[in-house]
């Protein structure tokens, strides 16, 4: 039965930028308890890395902080009990990655590139990713998120079992897409695009402008796509990117930012046509000067703000979950009701900061300066403290009783 069913499976895939993301789905027919139903075990092989992309006479290096793997089923259903990757699961990704083909578009209808069940390679350094899924039996999805403290997803996992699909019709088609959004695309480096003496604020805005340009023009509607067809013919999947390559206009915007007579972050962002409330989630804001800036309500989740000056900034209701704030200056900042869950605040200055009502669950506050900081009603469950200036023994006891961890 295994051999006959295998010959009825057709596999195709397309990876736009395999250096950045390489994905493949495979299905292995299994015996089913019902004589009129065929069951397929579905396996995922996926690899993340950095990618250099030519742009405007220079080049940029990008990586992913996350993304969403979506499945669409025709003629099949997924029993919830069959899922092998559960909510909040962490997967190890090997650093010693297999070298996949670097062609712009890849497809395979009859060739298996990996061995089913081979799992992770041995003797490899590993990094971690967080994993969440929904409960749909027809269109399941998994959200990939970079682990706190790491800038991008790097490495690969081979033949991880996703789930089992029951083919309930005469045919079964499984389509998978890996899609990314603003907070998932991270610009690591840029070469040959502007001079080196621009301010950190100009640099951060320009990098974000390029990252969002690449997202809209090249990474949508999907970054990778795969299809498995059981007793049916595959459906062609064209490149549905519709945003034109308006590189001349992009160059004009870059020139305006470089020529800007101001170093004010909000003014520079406006010149670049960026909205600080939504466009810097996942962005690289390392070393920026945001002193006194009003960012109330902004989404800065997963942003890299290492060493940034946020002193006296208005950050009420800002989403800084999983952000890197190591060494950042947040002294005197209004952080009321801010989301700092799983953020890295190692060596950050929070002196005189208002953290009343802030969500610090799972955050790293090791060696952070908390002199005269207001932590009243803050959620400190599983937050890590240690060697902190400004914490009295009474305050330490109170934080422990509220779920904080002292190392």
Image (cartoon, grey):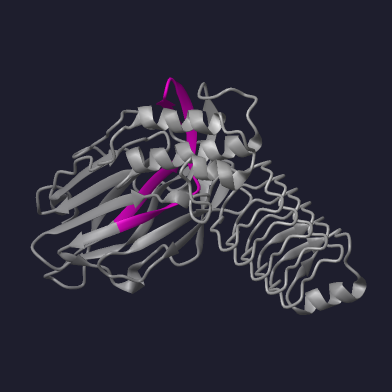
- Horizontal side of 234 relative to 105 (left or right) equals left
Give 21 or 173, whichever is nearer the viewer. 21
Query: Magenta region's main secondary structure?
Result: strand
Query: Is residue 38 highlighted in magenta?
Result: no
- Horizontal side of 79 relative to 128 (left or right) equals left
Residue at horizontal 61 percent and vertical 44 percent from the top: 265
Q: Is residue 210 visible?
A: yes
Q: Range of the magenta residues?
A: 42-70
Give 396 or 335, whichever is nearer the viewer. 335
- Residue 68 position by quadrant: bottom left
Residue 44, image x and y in percent?
35, 51
Residue 324, image x and y in percent?
65, 51
Residue 11, image x and y in percent?
21, 45
Residue at horizontal 56 percent and vertical 41 percent from the top: 268
Q: Is residue 356 above or below residue 164?
A: below
- Horizontal side of 153 relative to 228 (left or right) equals right
Residue at horizontal 36 percent and vertical 29 percent from the top: 247
- Residue 213 position by quadrant: top left
């Amino acid at each position: 039965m295994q051999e006959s069913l295998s010959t009825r499976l057709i596999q195709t895939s397309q990876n736009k930028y395999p250096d950045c993301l390489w994905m493949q789905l495979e299905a292995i027919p299994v015996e089913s308890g019902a004589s009129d139903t065929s069951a397929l075990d579905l396996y995922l092989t996926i690899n993340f890395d950095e990618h250099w992309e030519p742009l405007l006479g220079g080049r940029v290096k990008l990586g992913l902080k996350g993304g969403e793997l979506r499945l669409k089923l025709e003629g099949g259903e997924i029993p919830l009990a069959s899922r092998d990757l559960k909510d909040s699961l962490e997967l190890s990704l090997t650093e010693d990655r297999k070298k996949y083909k670097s062609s712009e578009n890849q497809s395979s209808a009859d060739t298996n590139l990996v061995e089913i069940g081979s799992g992770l390679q041995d003797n490899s350094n590993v990094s971690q990713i967080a994993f969440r899924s929904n409960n749909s039996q027809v269109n399941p999805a998994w959200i990939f998120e970079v682990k706190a403290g790491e800038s991008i997803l790097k490495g690969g996992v081979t033949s991880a079992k996703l789930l089992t699909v029951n083919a309930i019709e005469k045919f079964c088609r499984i389509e998978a897409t890996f899609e990314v959004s603003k907070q998932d695309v991270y610009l690591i480096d840029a070469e040959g695009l502007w001079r080196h003496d621009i301010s950190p604020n100009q640099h951060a805005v320009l990098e974000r402008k390029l990252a969002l340009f690449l997202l809209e023009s090249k990474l949508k509607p999907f970054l990778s796509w795969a299809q498995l067809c059981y007793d049916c013919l595959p459906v062609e999947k064209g490149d549905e990117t519709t945003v034109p390559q308006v590189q001349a206009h992009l160059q004009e915007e870059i020139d305006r930012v470089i020529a800007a007579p101001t170093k004010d972050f909000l003014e520079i962002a406006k010149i670049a046509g960026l909205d600080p409330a939504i466009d810097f989630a996942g962005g690289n804001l390392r070393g920026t000067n945001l002193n006194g800036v009003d960012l109330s309500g902004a989404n800065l989740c997963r942003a890299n703000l290492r060493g940034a000056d946020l002193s006296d900034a208005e950050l009420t209701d800002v989403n800084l979950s999983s952000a890197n704030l190591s060494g950042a200056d947040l002294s005197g900042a209004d952080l009321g009701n801010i989301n700092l869950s799983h953020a890295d605040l190692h060596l950050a200055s929070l002196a005189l900061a208002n953290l009343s009502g802030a969500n610090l669950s799972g955050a790293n506050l090791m060696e952070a300066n908390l002199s005269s900081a207001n932590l009243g009603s803050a959620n400190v469950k599983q937050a890590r403290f240690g060697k902190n200036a400004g914490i009295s023994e009474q305050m330490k006891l109170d934080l422990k009783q509220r779920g904080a961890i002292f190392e």
